[in-house]
Amino acid sequence: MKRIEVKLNLGAVAPLLDVMKVAADDLEPALAIEASVPSQDTEFAASWRAELLDGQRSDLALMLGMFDVDFFATGVLALDPTNAEPILRACTAIRLRLRVVHLQGLDDEQLETGSMTLESLSELQSRAFAAYAFLATLQELIVQHLDPSSSD
């Protein structure tokens, strides 16, 4: 099984984890994106939404669980095909939440290229943007190295 290990600087990542955890906690009662239910059946819609929310919770727990005691001892994140998709989804959910809560004043180009002046951001926005960029990089690593649709 293909596996990648990413060595991270603990001093740089630790403050980002606080921002990510708060965003994940904000998502506890809500989906990152409200789903449009393709049915008028309210019972079906409630069940479908609950299933999506359970999946989001599971994905977030798996991703945040990677930053455990072992991570703080080694600074290494281990990624493989068994955790790649849930981590991709969790990264997306947190990035969407950071956008809505802390980065709403920035447009897509600024967020994706980092073309804003960091001095114009508050300290909280700077940490949120750093977490946003970190999660984007993590997603890129997963897609590049663990994409199940690619052939090696």
Image: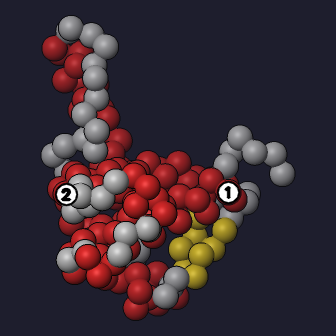
Taking the spot 69% from the left edge, 59% from the top edge, the residue there is: 145
The answer to whether 78 appears left or right of 129 in the picture is: right
Q: Is residue 60 visible?
A: no
The answer to whether 151 appears left or right of 45 in the picture is: right
Q: Secondary structure at mark 2?
A: helix
Taking the spot 31% from the left edge, 13% from the top edge, the residue there is: 38
Taking the spot 53% from the left edge, 65% from the top edge, the residue there is: 137
Taking the spot 69% from the left edge, 45% from the top edge, the residue there is: 148
Q: Is residue 5 above or below residue 97?
A: below
Amino acid type shown at disc 2:
Val
Amino acid type shown at disc 1:
Gln
Could you say where residue 118 lies in the image, as x and y percent from the top left?
A: 33, 78
Q: Closest to the observer: 71 or 9?
A: 9
Query: Which callout, 1 or 2, points to the residue nearer the camera?
Result: 2
Mark number, residue 101: 2
Q: Closest to the observer: 54 or 40?
A: 40
How would you rate the neighbour count of disc 1 (Cα within 10 Å): few for under 14, some for 14-19, many for 20 or more?
A: few
Badge 1 or badge 2: first in the primary sequence: 2
* Residue tagged 1: 144
